[in-house]
Amino acid sequence: PPEVLEPGAMVLRGFALRQAADLLAAVQQITSQAPFRHLVTPGGLRMSVAMTNCGELGWVSDRSGYRYDPIDPDSGQAWPAMPPLFHQLALDAAQAAGFSGFAPDACLVNRYAPGTRLSLHQDRDEGNYAHPIVSVSLGIPALFLWGGAQRADKTRRIALLHGDVVVWGGPARLRFHGVLPLPEARHPLTSTSRINLTFRKAG
Ligand code: MD3
Ligand code: FE
């Protein structure tokens, strides 16, 4: 049964377990065309998370700001297409959480190595906050930080394990969130890393 974090935020434990190996094979295919890279924030800091994208739009950051771009700035080419398996999983997970007809046009792929963290932030670069975001965790477990509407609000820690899917919509859509530094651990499918897929309707 879905675990409700708060209205609009639901954890579907193990929802992607069956597809996990196929999802990771697809990530390898994507990164052969659009390799993982460390983006720079508008303030000039190198992000410790390595990122790439698939789908019509990709999230990028550089000295000029954050944006969704149909072109990978590293290659000058379109991002790799979103694999049908990704699209179907995001649609099914959103449906299971009560959001029907989710049609993501962007999938941000994040890679965490031991020590990598993602500081508290909101996802506000998408066109319409009525659409949920679906996240899929693969590989070694992470502690996710779930905050409130203000950066200073108190945070909860939630363990996200291999195969867990979380849907964030409605009133939860603009919550501050982050990821604590990844521990040293091993997973048979990803070695020492954690891969997170986030599906968005950005355009
Ligand atoms: C809650 N990624 O890519 S996934 C991100 O594990 C991001 O890589 C984290 O935060 C990761 O922006 C967390 C969970 C998540 C993703 C997007 C959200 C939670 C969210 C958007 C709104 C609210
Ligand atoms: Fe986020």
Image (cartoon, rainbow, N blue to C red):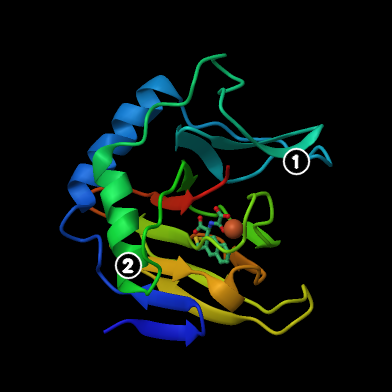
Residue type, mark 2 in image:
Gln
* Separation of marks 2 and 1 at Cα, in angstroms: 34 Å
Above or below for 77 versus 169: above
The crowd level at tag 2 (other Cα within 10 Å; few <14, some 14-19, many 20+) is: some
Distance from mark 1 CB to nearest ligand 1 atom below 8 Å: no
Residue 162: in sight, yes or no?
Answer: no
Query: In what quadrant of the picture does the N terminus appear?
Result: bottom left
Q: In the image as oriented, which residue stretches furthest toward the left? A: 18
Compared to residue 108, the image places residue 157 above or below, namely below
Left or right of residue 134, residue 71 in this image = right
Identify the residue shown where x is 51% and y is 15%.
Answer: 77
Q: Position of residue 157 (x, y in %)?
A: 53, 79
Quarter of image, ligand 1: bottom right
Position of residue 108 in the picture relative to residue 90 (left or right): right
Q: Which mark is residue 41?
A: 1
Residue 107 is situated, as x and y percent measured from the top left of the image, at: 45, 43
Depicted 186 relative to depicted 3: above or below = above
Kind of residue at badge 1:
Thr
Quadrant of the rendered image containing residue 71: top right
Indicate which disc, 2 or 1, sits on the residue closer to the N terminus.
Answer: 1
Q: Is residue 199 left or right of residue 150?
A: left
Q: Residues within 10 Å of mark 1 (few under 14, many from 20)?
A: some
Please name the residue shown 32% across and 57% down the image.
91
Label 2 residue SS = helix
Number of numbered discs present? Answer: 2
Q: Which mark is residue 95?
A: 2
Q: Is mark 2 within 8 Å of ligand 1?
A: no
Residue 62 position within the rendered picture, expressed as x and y whole percent measured from the top left: 74, 32
